[in-house]
Amino acid sequence: MSSSEQTTPSACLESDGDGIGGNEQEAEPDHWTERGRAASGSNSNATGRPRRSVLALGHITPMKVLARVLVLSLTFAAGIIAGGSACYLYFQLAVEADRSEVAEGRANEARAVCGFHQTALYQRAGLYHQKFGCWPTNVQELAVMHFLPEYSQVHLCSLQIPASGLITSYDQKGTFIEQTQHCTVGYYVLSPYRFRFDGTNFTVSCTLDVSHNQ
């Protein structure tokens, strides 16, 4: 080798970067991928690779925080109001159902009492028919002919009798008609019951409440 072709170590270091020294200076620091393996900086912006982003805390202002708190508070309050309204509606429906049940029970009791009175009047009218061969036209005839007392609870509809004035027990023979003590009684002239004979059937009806009629 001639002296003109010899190179010095310093010349190698000043080469255009093809040598080892140039690669060490121009190499970019490695970046960490999603899976934890090192990758070169030239591949960090490759299409399809997920990139991590961190929301800057400086963008969350106090007004935004206050707005979110206000929205959550309004939502919570609306839920409480809706739940309270539902509970109130359920309570109201329960109260109405209870009142309806009580009213129905009282109506059934009133029909039963009035039914006992109509049955007792029909029995006394039957006795009148057996004796005279005809049916009485009204309650007054039964009282005048002593088939009924002048004062008796049988002369009243159940709607005219307070709960405290009801007879405690009724019997099939109608002997309660003569009971005048410890109960509410009515005068026979004011009786709301009417008799009717259509040539075949004899009926007793209440004029105060048609739902009481048998």
Image (cartoon, rainbow, N blue to C red):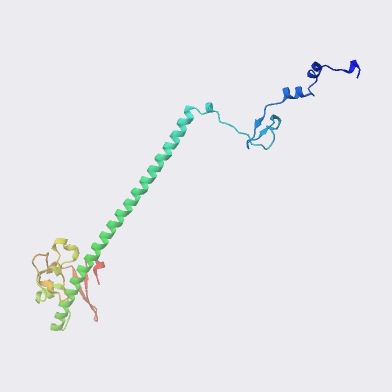
Choose between 8 and 180: the one closer to the eye: 8
61 up-or-down from 198: above or below: above
**Between 160 and 69, which is closer to the camera in this rendering?**
69
Q: Quadrant of residue 184?
A: bottom left
Question: Horizontal and vertical percent for residue 11?
Answer: 81, 17
Q: Is residue 84 visible?
A: yes
| Looking at the image, residue 92 lies above or below residue 160 | above
Is 104 on the left or on the right of 174, as rendered? right
Q: Quadrant of residue 112?
A: bottom left
Quarter of the rendering containing residue 204:
bottom left
Residue 4 at x, y percent in the picture: 90, 15
Judged left or right of residue 54, residue 64 is left
Residue drawn at x 46%, y 32% is: 67
**Label total for image:** 0
In the figure, is residue 52 to the left or right of 8? Answer: left
> At 77% across and 24% down in the image, what residue appears?
20
Could you tell me which residue is drawn at 90 percent across and 15 percent down? 3
Which quadrant: the N terminus? top right
Residue 208 visible? The answer is no
The quarter in which the C terminus is drawn is bottom left
Q: Position of residue 56 (x, y in %)?
A: 55, 28
Residue situated furthest front in the rendering:
1
Q: Position of residue 57 (x, y in %)?
A: 53, 28
